[in-house]
Image (cartoon, rainbow, N blue to C red):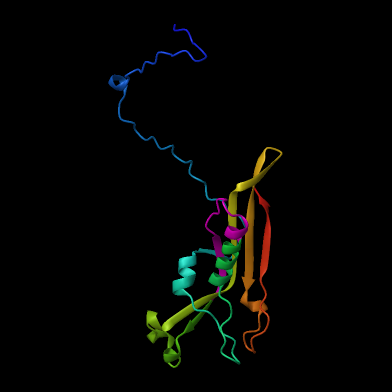
Amino acid sequence: MRNLVIGNLPQSRRSLNLGEYAEDATLVMEEQPTKEKRPLFIEANTMEATLDHLKSDCIIPVFAKDNEATLSHVAFIETVQDAARTFFQGEQIELPDIRVSHVIKGRIPEAIHKPANQLLESDKTIYYERCAFVIEIPTIYETVNGNRLNLTIGGVRAYNHTNLYSKKTAERFKVFIGFTC
């Protein structure tokens, strides 16, 4: 053991060459536990949907009197998602779980007079009258009686609450935030 000298006296320095014991580092990735998919809201009479499906496969209904488009389900979900990212900046925000119901089948204007059995897939249109979604923020949580409760933001939109057969009026949306297990 060498003596440590403190003060103005010169100290001897010696470096150890440990290169002969070193080897290339191997990056070990810890596997993330797979998150089990559990329903965050009632599933009865609904089906799962994705934002991509709502964007690419569904039309946006219009108000009949002035032909003005209503706010789409996609715009509603993305607006809430953007607000969550802004307000909870730096937190992990999951992709939305989306449920839809009451499919409304339609057709493009050029196919109005075609019989149903002669419609091509390109002639058909759909949209969903009702849409509900939840977005989990797992990095914000509380533990109550040993149960982990994650912060969850969600919304519900139902076109049947909006009179699409008249002029554009105020549109209704329901938004909620709370902790779910």
Q: Is residue 97 above or below residue 101?
A: above
| Residue most extreme to the front | 8
Residue under the image location 58 percent in, 67 percent down: 79
> Residue at (44%, 39%) from the top-left corner?
31
- Against 166, residue 125 (above or below) is above
Reply above or below: 118 against 19: below
Tell me the quarter of the image containing the N terminus.
top left
Q: Which residues are magenta?
A: 84-103
- Exactly how many numbered labels are in the figure? 0
Whether residue 43 is visible:
no
* Identity of the residue drawn at 55% across and 63% down: 98
Q: In the shown orientation, is residue 123 left or right of residue 154?
A: left
Q: In which quarter of the view is residue 101 placed?
A: bottom right
Q: Is residue 95 magenta?
A: yes
Pick the residue in front: 142 or 13.
13
Q: Is residue 42 left or right of residue 95?
A: right
Q: Tell me residue 105's x, y (percent).
A: 50, 79
Q: Quadrant of residue 165?
A: bottom right
Give the x, y percent position of residue 128.
55, 74
Quarter of the image holding residue 102?
Answer: bottom right
Nearest the camera: 180 or 16? 16
Q: Closer to the camera, 161 or 8?
A: 8
**Magenta stretch: includes residue 23:** no
Q: Residue furthest right?
A: 145
| Drawn side of residue 147 relative to residue 25, left or right | right
Q: Tell me where residue 78 appears, x and y as whole percent.
A: 55, 66
Query: Residue 140: in sight, yes or no?
Result: yes
Taking depth in this image into account, of 47 and 145 the one nearest to the observer is 145
